[in-house]
Amino acid sequence: MKRFITILLFVALMPVYAAASNNVTFNFYGDVISFRYDKTALVDFNEAALSDEQINAFYEKAENTDFSSLITALENYRTFKKADDWLFYQLVRNATEQISPKADNYLRYTLYKWYLMVKAGYGTLLSHNNGRLLFYIQCDENIYNIPYRQQNGRQYVCLNYHDYGSNINFEKEVFKGVAIALPEPQRIFSYKIEKLPDFNDADYIDKKLQFTYNTNEYNFSIKINSQITRLFNNYPVVEYKDYINIPLSNKTYASLITLLKKQLRGLNTKNGVDYLMHFTRYAFPFDADTDVFGSEKRLSPEQTLLSPYSDCDDRVGLFFFLVKEIYNLPMIVLAYPRHVTIAIKFDKPVGNTIEYKGAQYSVCEPTPQSKDLRLGELLPELKKEAYEVAYVYNPL
């Protein structure tokens, strides 16, 4: 019923159009999005004529075209679904694909995305070089592996770098910023994700997990959703505090957390954390992100459940999520030059401890090593290594 009400709200706010208007309806992660637009008024763009003048002309034509139904549909989704910026941008990408497919005219597709994000209130920049167009959004967070620009004391990160193979030599190729008068922005883009879509039940499949703990073999079946991979495609490397706090989708959460809580029944906190540590360590094959993806990535907890392989960053995220959800203990993420691990504050410390602000945190290694490290046991080669406390979690 909830999704149907949302659709009715979209329809109720649509203006009346002439016969030339087109109805557009598409599925977006479990919701049906509907809007109308005048197909004959589609703003075209000559891909062979990329220039400031052409971009300004595109913007002026778009401003004189009635996209009110589309803009209303986007804003309704954001409001009623409480969509984070990343999810909202994915909606903009999907809506743009309906009216100006990427494969037909890449520059026009990019300009439509840019225009809709401008209308949504975000600060933006455009730059171009030799027929290539880069689209930047104002974002104050530390984002890695994608280009950024500074202008008037504001930081802008590139949203479409991946479309050019994430491989532009900015020292040799100078991209010229586009001079265009735009409204003063009302929003700053954030990569923080606090809520996932209400996916369709049909999107979930079963995944088998197996690991051994204290000579006992455990075989689990949990619900996973391949739509997560699509949703996080091209999601950049973000700070530890942001990616490890990304939630699980509803059915994945219910299947995994319910199952683990059942297994942990009767165990004290330390033994329960030890169980979760071994589950995270051995239920998933290990491989470095650079070997799997070609570059460093930080997978959200659900991405780690989905992925065939994961490394130390990913397992720290999943382990953190499980401990937080089940025991809600204070934790710190420890970033060494070549490794990331985590330490937990118990009532009484266990084994190797890290002192942080007067408290003792016991190391809990969630990544497989040559030795089966016990609770509170730090890798020997890390004992003299410098580290950074990359994230601190204190339960409310």
Image (tube, rainbow, N blue to C red):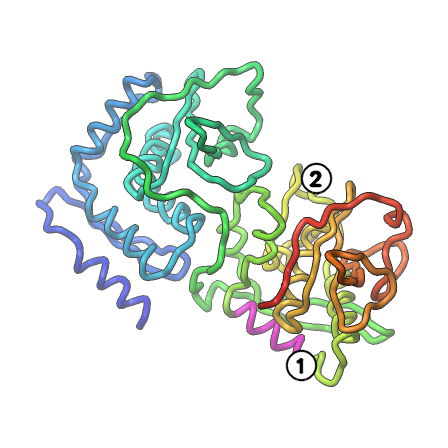
Mark 1–mark 2 Cα distance, whole angstroms, equals 36 Å
Which residue is disc 1 drawn over?
A: 262
**Foreground: 44 or 391?**
391
- Asked if residue 3 is among those painted magenta in the image, a careful observer would answer no
Residue 132 vertical position relative to residue 246 in the rendered view, above or below: above
Which residue is disc 2 drawn over?
A: 290
Pointer 1 with pointer 2, Cβ within 8 A: no
- How far from the left and from the top, in percent, is residue 293? 65, 41
Q: Who's the residue at 87% across and 74% down the image?
A: 215
Q: Which residues are magenta?
A: 251-261
Which residue is farthest front?
A: 358
Which quarter of the rendered picture does the C terminus lie within? bottom right
Q: Please state which amino acid type lies under the numbered disc 2.
A: Thr
- How far from the left and from the top, in percent, is residue 316? 70, 56
Element type at marker 2? helix
Residue 175 vertical position relative to residue 22 in the rendered view, above or below: above
Query: Toward which corner of the image does residue 385 lie, by quadrant?
Result: top right
**Foreground: 369 or 393?**
393
